Amino acid sequence: MALIVQKYGGTSMGSAERIRNVARRVARWKAQGHQLVVVVSAMSGETNRLIALAKDVSPQPDARELDVMVSTGEQVTIALLAMALKDIGIDARSYTGGQVKVLTDSTHTKARILHIDDANMRRDLDRGTVVIVAGFQGVDENGNITTLGRGGSDTSGVALAAALGADECQIYTDVDGVYTTDPRIVPEARKLERVTFEEMLEMASLGSKVLQIRSVEFAGKYKVKLRVLSSLEEEGQETSGTLITFEEDKNMEQPIISGIAFNRDEAKLTVLGVPDRPGIAYQILGPIAENNIDVDMIIQNVGHDGTTDFSFTVNRGDFARTKKLLEEQIQPHVGARAIEGDSKICKVSAVGVGMRSHPGVASKMFRTLAEEGINIQMISTSEIKISVVVDEKYLELAVRVLHRAFGLDQA
Ligand code: ADP
Ligand code: ASP
Ligand code: MG
């Protein structure tokens, strides 16, 4: 008997029929003698619908109230799944994040999990009850409802698995595993049987939304056995998905590149003609950080005539706010000539632990993009990834040609 945490995403919970299908899958695992905790997302589209409704009422909705509202999506699906399980004779009980309780900090809309109380869940599991928990939500120390950021049900699933010491955390989604790139963009993408934790962390942080980055961080910290699988496969046809491994397979020749990740959700800002003197980066980025705006890539060009240009990228959702901050507060302060912004950029990255031992990956990437006439605006590298910023209109082309150039296309 094993203790298994299963997480079902929005598409998997997207209709009455799909919810009944999830119930049947849970019942099959239960019939094998396992204890089950099931974490669910809202029905697909529901979280977007709720956020749009909030923005219709208030252009910048209050974050606390937004959390009260968007958390309802998951409150609906936990109850529906419990009903569907009971209908097929399986004892099940649903819990909101607050009822569990999943304690978080108070950063509304992107709260962090601090502690999970396992008492209610353990009591139910000991009785043979299937525990169903609302993903994406928690509660702060004052009882306020919080949410964990978009895609946060993955993190709920892995955090619950860590708290319970589960034998495995299974993330059920609408693809049958982690691919070499998003299979919706490149149909030739290949499913990976295994991917190292390090690579998954990079892929998630660079935009592969198949797993929320924080869920991968949790899995790493607490060594949770994590697997990505399809919830849409028929009984008897199930495959074993992708296992996130903590060790590189020493017996296998590592491919140099394991995957291509991309992120459309980026915007670039440039501060032109700032005086080239110590402290400038701090004077520009300090106020940005104080306003809770995450900065990703940064480039400071070589100075000439005593001035330099300073560029950085932020989430596209923070673009307008960052530009305003630069124009109204930072530009006058640092004496810059002008502020330029481009919200139509994207980031494309090649990821692979094999890169460590193989030089020449960067030049191959740059040559491949050059052959397609794709201009690289910014570059950043780490030991196991190379990222470039390019015009958004080239996103799909860049991903496809890099996927092919690094030998990732299916034979
Ligand atoms: P869920 O609602 O189940 O959480 P998501 O939409 O958040 O599902 O994540 C699954 C989607 O992630 C897939 O449908 C796929 O389009 C996308 N995706 C992006 N990169 C990858 C990748 N490398 N491998 C698999 N899927 C990917
Ligand atoms: N329903 C939430 C979202 O759409 C959480 C999740 O699906 O993981 O972001
Ligand atoms: Mg998701």
Image (spheres, rainbow, N blue to C red):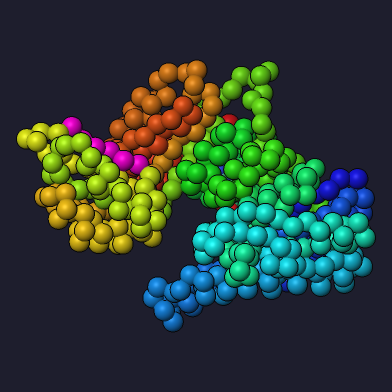
Q: Return the residue nearer the eye: 106 or 242.
A: 106
Q: Residue at x 52, y 40 (%)?
A: 203
* Residue 1, visible in the rendered structure: yes
Q: Residue at x 77, y 63 (%)?
A: 132
| Image quarter of the N terminus | top right
Q: Is residue 57 magenta?
A: no
Q: Return the residue nearer the eye: 104 or 97.
A: 104
Q: Position of residue 119 (x, y in %)?
A: 81, 59
Residue 324 is left or right of residue 133, and the answer is: left
Q: Position of residue 248 (x, y in %)?
A: 64, 25
Residue 98, picture quadrant: bottom right
| Image quarter of the C terminus | top right
Q: Residue at x 52, y 75 (%)?
A: 65
Q: Residue at x 53, y 23 (%)?
A: 354
Q: Position of residue 287 (x, y in %)?
A: 30, 53
Q: Residue furthest front?
A: 142
* Residue 229, visible in the rendered structure: no
Region in magenta: 297-302
